Image (cartoon, rainbow, N blue to C red):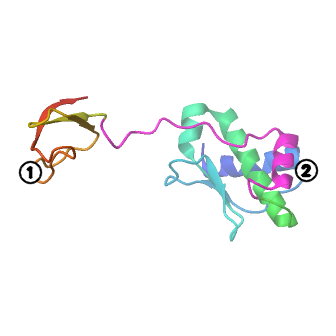
Amino acid sequence: MEQKQLQALVEQISMSTFGKPFRHTAFFNPRLRTTGGRYMLQTHNIELNQKHYEQFGEEELIAIIKHELCHYHLHLEGKGYRHRDRDFRELLQKVGAPRYCRPIGQKTDRSKTIYTYICTSCGLTYTRKKRMNTARYVCGNCRGRLKLANQRR
């Protein structure tokens, strides 16, 4: 979907659902990662996450646009436009917009490796998510030396 098509879609949804014109700019922001879209208070523009459109389709994009237009119209009218405000929640319910967008499968930064350490003196075992330097740390029970037993993925 191109910029002109997106702008036309937002303007059409604003008129048909809210009965009010959208007089600012809507565009895809490639830097958005965890949110479906956002309404900018200073410029009154709406930024949308193109990954939501690519992964879930136009129906999800329309739902996100409705959500952001709720912020837009309430802010311009001087009413409660934040997620916690009653005006916002009532308008969301009235227009059938979701409060949250569907999550995109994010890549995990950390591996699921589990490290097991054993005390050479008392035999106490420690499991850790992070690898530790056994030369710097000792057993908290008997102050004995630690040894890496194994690592699981």
Residue type at the position of mark 1: Ala
> Would residue 5 be counted in the magenta stretch?
no
Q: Is residue 49 left or right of residue 24?
A: left
User: Residue 94 lies in magenta, yes or no?
Assistant: yes
Q: Give the residue drawn at x 38%, y 39%.
A: 108
Mark 2 burial class by Cα count in 10 Å: few <14, some 14-19, many 20+: few
Q: Nearer the viewer, residue 122 or 44?
A: 122
22 sits to left or right of 116? right
Q: Name the disc covering residue 143, or none.
A: none
Residue 98, position in %: x, y?
Answer: 73, 40
Residue 103 locus on image (x, y percent): 56, 37
Give 139 or 78, whichever is nearer the viewer.
139
Region rendered in magenta = 82-111
Residue occupying image coordinates x 72% and y 40%:
63
Nearer the observer: mark 2 or 1; the answer is 1
Three-letter amino acid code at the position of disc 2: Gly
Identify residue for label 1: 135
Point 74% across, 53% down: residue = 83
Measured from the top left, where is residue 9 in percent x and y? 73, 45
Front residue of 142 and 91: 142
Residue drawn at x 14%, y 49% as measured from the top left: 133
Where disc 2 sits, the SS reads loop
Secondary element type, mark 1 = loop
Extreme residue toward the bottom, this view: 42
Determine the CA span between mark 2 and mark 1: 69 Å
Report the disc number at residue 19: 2
